[in-house]
Image (cartoon, rainbow, N blue to C red):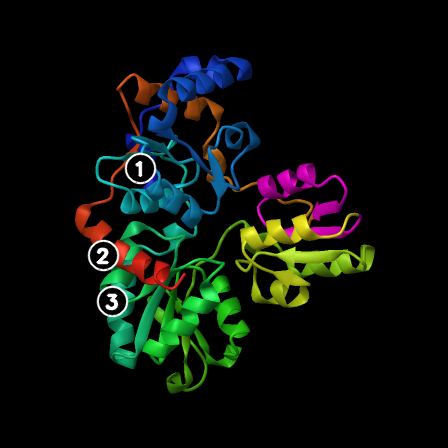
Amino acid sequence: MNIFEAVEQKTPMLPEQYKQASTEDLEQRVRGVKERMGSRLYLPGHHYQKDEVIQFADDRGDSLKLAQLSADNHQAEAIVFCGVHFMAETADILTKPEQKVYLPDMRAGCSMADMANIDQTEQAWQKLMELFDDTIMPLTYVNSTAAIKAFVGKNNGATVTSSNAERMVSWAFTQKERILFLPDQHLGRNTAYNLGIPLEQMAVWDPIINELIYEGSIEDIKVILWKGHCSVHENFTVQNVHQLREESPDMNIIVHPECRREVVALSDDAGSTNHIINTIENAPSGSSWAIGTEMNLVNRIIQEHPDKHIISLNPNMCPCLTMNRIDLPHLAWCLESIENDEPHNVIEVDANIARDAKKALDRMLERA
């Protein structure tokens, strides 16, 4: 049983009235709470959220940007994070103690973050120290649990985002000879490759068998990649690229760096969610694009740019299933529970974990 299955067993069930309410009724109820609570309430919304939810967001962005905006919003007493669990944790770590962070549905997890738990990480670290001594800097993608961020913070490492990964990996190599990159092997591999580190100097740590996967002399290893991935971005394939090149050779392909190395290599461009959004926004009218990222965002980009021909790189792609746990009924229920002083789904990171996780976040933010 993973953490989100355990959470699901203890999470209060959505009351029937919200399941049966019409979309119009739910929208009115959400607007009503927002109007009545005013500046005491803040709703950050991640780019991958459904349209029915993102329409009510006070700000849209990636996970770190939204956590920072939450921390900067000193008026808000309640922060209802429309995203997934690790994002709400980061907001709780960065906000003031008197501010409360809520997640409308506690089942909104992240399969990638769930691929690196603290027990696995501590076991891996012990073995890696035996192999490499004190020559490794741990880095974790912000798409990780608070416990993993705390582990990295305690061991003098930092968090990274898809926007600043190259800068943070470059910094890490000024501190140590090697890096351990958690939990997304694809972002780690693509970032290191872009910085000139050959694939032959990258190993993979498999947490299931608790072993280092590598051929050759371990002394040559510069990057140790945790064997984790994004279940959405890993579904973009080389076959998708080849098929598009045959059918529409003039179409530009842009993908997220959480995609496999082979897919990134065959694409015209790769970058963070914000990079993708900005690239399409600044592209000339009439240009054609195939985008390799989450489907809710791709559909929104299509709607916002009718002057451009835009498709998903994978025509069979579905939205991020865990992100889609946040829906209009859960949002309305969460907001009315807060207003009625009967809140549920409060995100509270243990103080010791929060302290060490903030070290990892601060090391990154200092280099922003």
The amino acid sitting under disc 2 is Asp
Residue nearest the observer in this picture, 284 or 10: 284
Where residue 31 sits in the image (x, y, percent)? 46, 19
56 to 315, vertically: above or below: above
C-alpha separation, residue under disc 1 versus residue under disc 2: 23 Å
Query: CB atoms at circles 3 and 1 under 8 Å apart?
Result: no
x 68%, y 36%: residue: 303
C-alpha separation, residue under disc 3 versus residue under disc 1: 31 Å
Residue receiving disc 3:
155
Residue nearest the observer in this picture, 216 or 136: 136
> In this view of the protein, can residue 10 be seen by the observer?
yes
The amino acid sitting under disc 3 is Asn
Q: In the picture, residue 358 is in which quadrant?
A: bottom left
Residue 298 inside the magenta-drawn segment: yes
334 sits to left or right of 320: left
289 sits to left or right of 293: right
Residue receiving disc 2:
356
Residue receiving disc 1:
74
Q: Secondary structure at mark 3?
A: loop
The amino acid sitting under disc 1 is His
Q: Which residues are magenta?
A: 286-311
Mark 1 or 2: in front is: 1
Residue 236 inside the magenta-drawn segment: no
98 sits to left or right of 233: left
Which residue ends up furthest to the left in the rendered image? 352
Q: Earlier in the sequence, mark 3 or mark 2?
A: 3
